[in-house]
Amino acid sequence: MATKTKYELTKKDFRQMNRRNIFLNQLGWNYEKMQGSGYLFIVLPQLRKIYGDHTPELKQAMRMQNQFFNTNPYLNTTIQGLDVALEEKQGISSLETVSGLKNGLMGPVAAIGDTIFASLIPAIIGAIAANMAVQGNPAGAFLWLAVNIAIMYFRWIQLEFAYKGGVTLVTKLQGEMNALTNAATLLGVYVVGALIASLVNIDVPFVAHIGKMTVNLQNEFDTIMPKMIPGLAVGLIYWILGRKRMTSTKAIFIVIIVAVVFSALGVLGKGA
């Protein structure tokens, strides 16, 4: 299987990706993959040029790109730039690395982007512009407009900047791609583990009364290993997904049904 491709991305490709990112990034948003479908839509024309139409390599790349993805929309093209740079230079052999980078970077990029673009800029610049507008100064509206134009310009140029950085990275690490792949995969595993601990919350409300002693089962589990139950639950879901004829949609319905039944029986606490 070829590892390198002949196609090199052009300014036209960057413009196309940027337009799709700005206007259609949330296309197909859903609770299963969040921005995954939109991500695939943004990079699909470039994937077709890299791998060719109707090829097994294109199908494999599309399946990987349609995985779960969710990050700040103002910085997501940073990841896409690194992505297409790797796939352009390494072809199908880069998919494992790209998958690891997407999983590993979407969390940190979201934290940075949310802090800057969802908190700092609206709070600081928005407050200044609103105060000026309340006082009858029309410059407040122009200030807010200018800031948003600057943000849109930043969104536009970061893609090519990240792409060039990705090309340089691949060129310098030609003989070390396996190490990069392993590092990216390990980073992705750490991020997934952190997401489990922070987002999955399952409580076992059983309390045993032994004489005058009261034993809270959840406290005992936390003493052995904090977040052990959420970890086991996610591990079980991964095991279910590995079964034949099992799909993500089926697994989601199984989780919903089990959660509803257990909650009705009082097996799961309100944190589940």
Image (cartoon, helix red, strand yellow):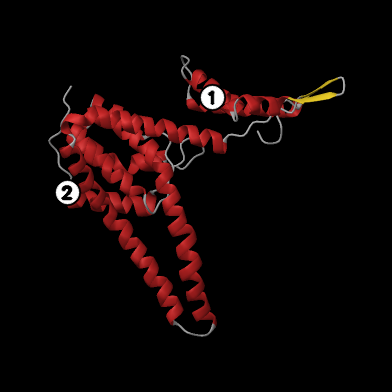
Please tell me in which quadrant of the rendered image residue 56 appears: top left
| Spot occupied by residue 220 in the image (x, y as percentages of width and height) | 69, 25
Residue 251 tag number: 1
The reply to whether residue 13 is visible in this rendering is: yes
**Quarter of the figure that contains the N terminus:** top left
Residue 167 percent coordinates (x, y): 19, 42
How many marks can you see?
2
Q: Which mark is residue 10?
A: 2
Q: Position of residue 66 (x, y in %)?
A: 38, 34
The reply, left or right, for residue 233 in relation to residue 132 is right
Q: Quadrant of residue 231?
A: top right
Residue projecting furthest to the right = 212
Tell me where residue 207 appears, x and y as whole percent.
78, 25
**Left or right placement of residue 163 versus residue 125 in this view:** left
Pointers 2 and 1 in contact (C-beta within 8 Å): no
Say which quadrant the C terminus sits in.
Answer: top right
Instruction: Please say if 115 is above or below 146.
Output: above
Q: Residue at x 40, y 42 (%)?
A: 106
Question: Residue drawn at (33%, 33%), measured in percent from left and top?
Answer: 184
Of residues 11 and 235, the one nearer the viewer is: 235
Q: Residues within 10 Å of mark 2 (few under 14, many from 20)?
A: few
- Above or below: residue 236 compared with residue 33: above
Instruction: Say which amino acid is labelled 2.
Output: Thr
Q: Nearer the viewer, residue 254 or 72?
A: 72
Give the mark, 2 or 1, whose residue is nearer the N terminus: 2
